[in-house]
Amino acid sequence: MSALKIENLVCGYRPGKPVVNGVTFTVDDGQFVGIVGPNGSGKTTLLRAVVGLLPIENGAITIGSHRLEQLERRELARRIAFVPQLMEPVDGFSVEELVRLGRTPYFDRFSFEQPDDYDAVDWAIEELKIEGLARRQTTELSGGEFQRVAIARALAQEPRVMLLDEPTSHLDIRYQVSLCKLLRKLRSHRSIVATFHDLNLASRFCSRLVLLKNGALIAEGPPDQVVTPENIWKAYRLKVSVRKNPTTQRARYVLLP
Amino acid sequence: MAKISDRRAGPALLLLLTAVVVAAACLSLFFGSVLLSPGDLLHNEILWQIRLPRVILAALLGLLLSVSGVILQGTLRNPLADPYVLGISAGGAIGAALAIATGLQTISVPALAFLTSLLAVYVVYKLSQVAGKTSPETLILAGVALSAFCAAVLSLIIIISGNLQAIYFWLLGSLSSASWLNVITVIPYALAGSGIAYFFSKELNALLLGEEMAQTLGVDVERTRLLLIGTASLMTAAAVSVAGLVGFVGLIVPHFIRLLIGPNHRLLIPAAALSGMLLLIVTDALARTLLAPTEIPIGIIMALLGAPFFLYLLRRRRVAGK
């Protein structure tokens, strides 16, 4: 069953000037979908529309069996979580307190954290392997550590789909790889949609790729069908050859001289 | 500094603060232009008709001003927001002065102060919006400009009404006219306001992550902002109507408590409310005794303490921003 269905989506920041223009794809339960494409291709805008931060001009977004516009903000927040490219740490908050903010959509007006909420927070912290950081101040963490805290906060929301905007862009290669491994593992609980700049990294870890250019879909499918010299030429105007990683059998591009 | 973020430390801190507030209130009953002894406790007019309502009113004033400071800083995501700096107090003062000058009943003073303070907050909020966004700097500047404007209007009211001494002394901020009627007038604002603030602490906490993140956590930011700014204006108006202009409480108390226990509003709101009560009880006791039998308006003492603290905050923010 599809967790997230995007049909012919048109959206943007000003009416009549769509940034995403007629994109269609589906994300099934348990999939890790990578959205790739050049700068300004509409990757972030697409995520913002799915999480309800941007009005839809045309087309439809369906989450499980609900249309996006039928869901109340709080109901939406229980289904979709968003990790922005740059999240600011909160001065005076410990890691655990920040992760606990992910439970906000579950609180009623006159009640606060229930045992369930503490369980979800502990679980999210374990999944991200940041137990050792739980009592640290968020302002003291390195970029790589804080990225995990930001993801734990989204996971504590117990969403059906987790959206991440360029989760690897500020990390060194070691953290990039360990983060991608973690996301690949997390998809067994939640579908994951993440934007990437590094096509090879996305191809290595994602179950499907969506390639955008100027807000339109260039290709969509398993990585070896998307990472082809023709598609990369269409999207980036770069001449490349595509090889398969001998161990993982995943497609990766190599720049031609 | 170590932060008290343990799940059990919060209630313990609040209990301790409550005990200190009660002790300070009891003690301050005996200080004033007439010193009382514990023996006067049962049959003393000064104690029951003047001191007790005054101490309670001081506590309520501290609560109103600090909680509205917490609310404004949280909803506007600006550490420098406070009812005084944003011109809400000055706006409220116009309404209250009008009510006094035209000889309206005491009950209508808060009502009129409320209307003009809401008007002030609306004007400041609109003025500070540049291309749909509110920046901290323009917000402060708009507040300062509006305060200056309100001061001019106030002077005009004073001159026209010819009631200089009454209104001017009242503007300096004083609890010298405290009565049981004042206490009864203000209590509903204090209770309802802090209750609303407390039950919106999850929204205020989510806003710590920024407006958009709060939205993705299911918070209706616009509606929350409107409701909470309305609440803070209401609380400020109530405070202004009984005590005139007492500034900086909403700035000093929340910041100090935030440094001590962190920004979790569920603890911050009650802790700031109690600390505000304590600060005002102590300050008002000083106002009564320092130059006895002359009273120093409490607003003067708060400004003497608050203005340097405000400058310290500005500098700290500048350094942290670099």
Image (cartoon, helix red, strand yellow):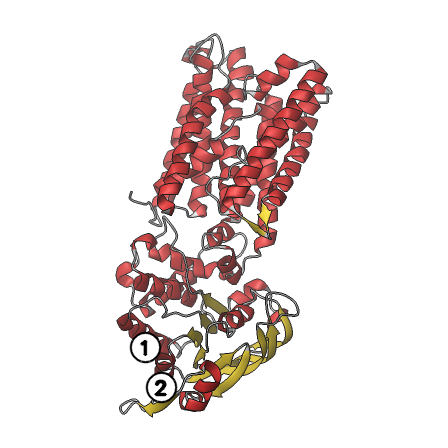
**Residue A154: x %, y % from top left:** 43, 65
Disc sitting over residue B196 in the figure: none
| Near-viewer residue (A244 or B231) | A244
Q: Is residue B29 visible?
A: no
Closer to the camera in the image, A44 or A185: A44
C-alpha separation, residue under disc 1 versus residue under disc 2? 20 Å
Q: Of the residues shown, which amino acid type is indicated by label 2?
A: Tyr
- The answer to which image quadrant residue A122 occupies is bottom left
Q: Is residue B298 above or below residue B293?
A: below
Subunit under mark 1: A
Determine which quarter of the picture holds residue A143: bottom left
In the rendered view, would you say B283 is above or below A146?
above
Classify B161 as above or below A80. above
Q: Which residue is located at x 39 percent, y 42 percent?
A: B318
- Residue A38 at x, y percent in the picture: 46, 76
Q: Secondary structure at mark 2?
A: strand
Residue under the point 57% across and 39% down: B193
Would residue A130 be seen by someone viewing this image from the given angle?
yes
Specify the subunit that label 2 lies on.
Answer: A
Secondary structure beneath dot 1 equals helix
Nearer to me, A257 or A32: A257
In the figure, is residue B24 to the left or right of B212?
Answer: left
Residue beneath the point at 66% across and 25% down: B153
| Residue B281: image location, x then y, percent | 45, 24
- Residue denoted by label 2: A253
Q: Nearer the viewer, residue A237 or B24?
A: A237
Crowd class of label 1 (few under 14; some 14 to 19; many from 20; radius 10 Å): some
Disc 1 residue type (three-letter): Lys
Q: Which mark is residue A181?
A: 1
For image coordinates 44% across by 18% down, the residue present is: B285
